[in-house]
Image (cartoon, grey):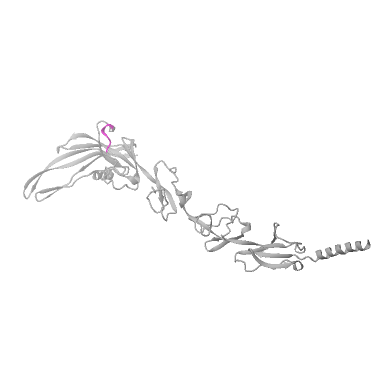
Amino acid sequence: MRNSKLSIIMVALTVVLLSSCASYTSEYFVNGQSYALQDSSQFRQPADPENLAENEVFVGWELQGTDGIYTNWQMTPEYNARFDAVIDRYIDFYVGDEVWASVKASEFANPGVPTAPADNLQFVGWVPEGAENPVENWTTPPRDVNVYHAKFVNTVKFYDNGVLVDTQLVTDFADPGVPVAPSTDVVFAGWCPVGTEEAITDWSVAPEGVDEVYARYVDKVYFYLDGNLWTVLRADQFTNPGDPVPRDIPRGYEFAGWVAETDYATYIDWTTLPDDVRRFDAMLTSTTVASGMDSANEQLRLNLAKNTQVLGPITVEETYEIVGDQVRIGGIGYKDILAAAIEAYPDADQVVDIITDYETHTADSDYGTITFQTASYTGIAIAIE
């Protein structure tokens, strides 16, 4: 009986000794390739792997079947264990040729908004190298992309009277709408690239090389008939507005032309708008006394909707000169009559109710007696308040 017990004890001891002498291995892999092999007696943290890619960084060893970096290097696994190297990588974000930020792939996130290298550029996102469109999903980085580039797009700035009212990407170019005119005496003429007066009409694509656009306004030019507004034109489209229809003209008068607010004679040159003129008034005429020349004397009726003051009469006579058997008569125009009025009445602004009289002359010449007529013009000088 004693020998049986001894046999059992010896067998158990043998099992314990055999168990204590059991050997296990720990194998380490880097990117799927075997890197190192240890048996139980050699178990310890191996050296960090070398020859990683330039942008890669070793993080630690992960024991297969666990989650996270292994740290308990004093406890030998009692089984054949596999450890895999955890490799992280750096992702570089470039602005131009310079690295703006570097982040680990495990910490992948939008690195922020860089400053645009020029005032006419706007940052629109980070573009993976080799791609065209910026990243929208920042949850997981593509495994094969380690470089991102800042993408900037040209902008177009819209100004209204020097105030920035809109900034658009050239890729989103569109008509910003009609602004509120700063005055009732001007009209919006369109959005024009800086340096031009040509309004943009094609909004399907931004004009090449244009980064600033301004709201252009042009003055209105008013035309009055008998003190009432007759029509309005844009200053940049200045032209002869035409003649009023007879029913719009006061009874007993005829339309004789348009008079600029700074003048007193009908306007002739419709190709140019004087810088300081934004109003024209209709000059109306009526027939008065028949002349000996079978033409009409005219009374001028210039309606400026202003107060007037009668200064007095003014008469201007034509001069003449006999040369051989010819008579040269110095012509008289309205400006001559007005000049004489101003000389007599410094406050004179206009001469109205002009009547023409004719005087017959006879003169001797080397070729005999010559008979001819000269005219005299009499009107009323007035001041316009």
Q: Give 299 or 102, whichever is nearer the viewer.
A: 102
Q: Is 180 on the left or on the right of 2, as rendered?
A: left
Residue 4 in sight from this viewpoint: yes
Q: Is residue 245 above or below residue 145?
A: above
Q: Give 376 or 121, whichever is nearer the viewer.
A: 121
Residue 251: x and y in percent read 26, 30
Residue 148: x and y in percent read 55, 59
Q: Is residue 133 magenta?
A: no
Residue 162 in sight from this viewpoint: no
Q: Is residue 202 above or below residue 312?
A: below
Residue reaching furthest left? 368
Snapshot quadrant of residue 282: top left
Q: Is 240 on the left or on the right of 209, as rendered?
A: left
SS majority, magenta: loop
Q: How many marks?
A: 0
- Give the position of the N terminus as an image quadrant: bottom right
Question: What residue is at 63 percent from the left and 57 percent from the top?
Answer: 107
Question: What residue is at 61 percent from the left and 62 percent from the top?
Answer: 89
Q: Is 343 on the left or on the right of 94, as rendered?
A: left
Residue reaching furthest top? 251
Question: What residue is at 62 percent from the left and 64 percent from the top?
Answer: 56
- Give the position of the C terminus as an image quadrant: top left
Q: Give 351 or 17, whichever is nearer the viewer.
A: 17
Q: Is residue 246 magenta?
A: yes
Span shown in magenta: 243-247
Q: Is 210 on the left or on the right of 52, as rendered?
A: left
Residue 320: x and y in percent read 15, 47
Residue 67: x and y in percent read 70, 56
Q: Give 166 or 96, whichever is nearer the viewer.
A: 96
